[in-house]
Image (cartoon, grey):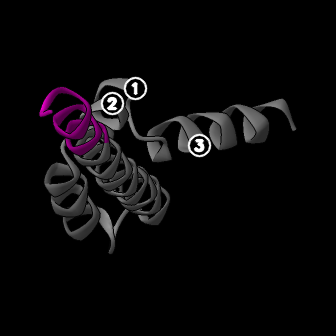
Amino acid sequence: MSDQNLTNQSNDSQEELHTGLKIVSFCFPIVGAILYFVNKEKHPKKAKSACTLALWGFGIGIVINILLTLLGGAAALVGGN
């Protein structure tokens, strides 16, 4: 029975996306999209993780761009007599 648990744990660890790839997927969503399409058939958990992180990275990037645009516009209004 412990052999089966050990096998399940090793399969789970192989299904997890490595931490470095998680960070890259978040910071560069195109990499997450590529990892999704590469892994979607054989490793669906890796693919889902890469896709989720890519979508989060994309969404947060949009929010940051909106905030920076608003702050830049506000600074121009305040400083532009």
**Count of numbered circles in the view:** 3
Q: Nearer the viewer, residue 73 or 33?
A: 73
Image quarter in which the N terminus is found? top right
Q: Nearer the viewer, residue 8 or 18?
A: 18
> Residue 49 — which label?
none
Q: Residue 80: give x, y in percent of width and height.
A: 12, 33
Mark 3 vs mark 1, foreground winner is 1
Q: CA distance from mark 3 to mark 1?
A: 14 Å
The stretch of residues the image draws in magenta is 71-81
Q: Residue 45: give x, y in percent of width and height.
A: 50, 58
Residue name at image x 45 percent, y 58 percent: 52
Q: Residues within 10 Å of mark 1 (few under 14, many from 20)?
A: few
Q: Amino acid at mark 1?
A: Thr
Q: Residue furthest right?
A: 1
Q: Amino acid at mark 2?
A: Ile
Image quarter in which the C terminus is found? top left
Q: Residue beneath label 2, please?
A: 23
Q: Residue beneath label 1, please?
A: 19
Disc 1 + disc 2, Cβ < 8 Å:
yes
Task: Reply yes or no: does residue 72 show up in magenta.
Answer: yes
- Comes first in the chain, label 3 or label 2: 3
Q: Residue 29: give x, y in percent of width and height.
A: 22, 52
Relative placement, left or right, of 61 versus 31 is right
- Comes first in the chain, label 3 or label 1: 3
Q: Residue beneath label 3, please?
A: 12
Q: Nearer the viewer, residue 76 or 31?
A: 76
Q: Main secondary structure of the magenta part?
A: helix
Residue name at image x 30 percent, y 37 percent: 71
| Quadrant in the rendering for residue 37 | bottom left
Dot 2: what SS?
Answer: helix
Q: Amino acid at mark 3?
A: Asp
